[in-house]
Amino acid sequence: QVQLVESGGGLVQPGGSLRLSCAASGSIFSITAMGWYRQAPGKQRELVAHMSNEGNIDYADSVKGRFIISRDNAKNAVYLQMNNLRPEDTAVYYCNAVLLGATMALMDSWGKGTLVTVSS
């Protein structure tokens, strides 16, 4: 079994910054990619940022130039530095990992989410 635990969400004023963290643990053989998604009230979950083991990064157009994704492979962790936050960034942010479990089964694992609220 694999667990992803996010932290770092909270309330921030427009223009402020937050840093999200996510650590994967459990029966993991290897992690292929990790990333962040978000879901705002009444909207579908959407990709925020994604990073492969090779270092390939994708960002949603709406966060380019403001958010930075990084990984610590030794810790099975992924981070999201969010700068110049806007009210429209308000959402529950979910950590995602594509990985091989201990049984070599390919898995798409999700955290439970952390709430980010951008408001004055």
Image (cartoon, rainbow, N blue to C red):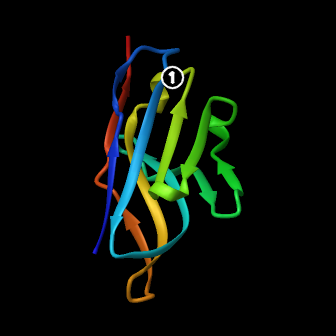
Instruction: Name the residue: 38% across, 53% down.
Output: 23
Q: Residue at x 51, y 39 (%)?
A: 80
Residue 18: image x %, image y %? 45, 27
> Which residue is at a point 34% across and 46% down the rendered structure image?
6
Give percent across and percent down for residue 89. Answer: 47, 31
Residue receiving disc 1: 86
Residue drawn at x 46%, y 58% is 76
Q: Quadrant of residue 28?
A: bottom left
Residue farthest along the front direction in this orientation? 74
Q: Is residue 17 above or below residue 33?
A: above
Query: Disc 1 residue type?
Result: Arg
Q: Quadrant of the N terminus?
A: bottom left
- Quarter of the image holding residue 56? bottom right
Label 1 element class: loop
Q: Residues within 10 Å of mark 1 (few under 14, many from 20)?
A: some
**Residue 46: where, in percent of width, then height?**
50, 51
x, y (%) of residue 112?
28, 53
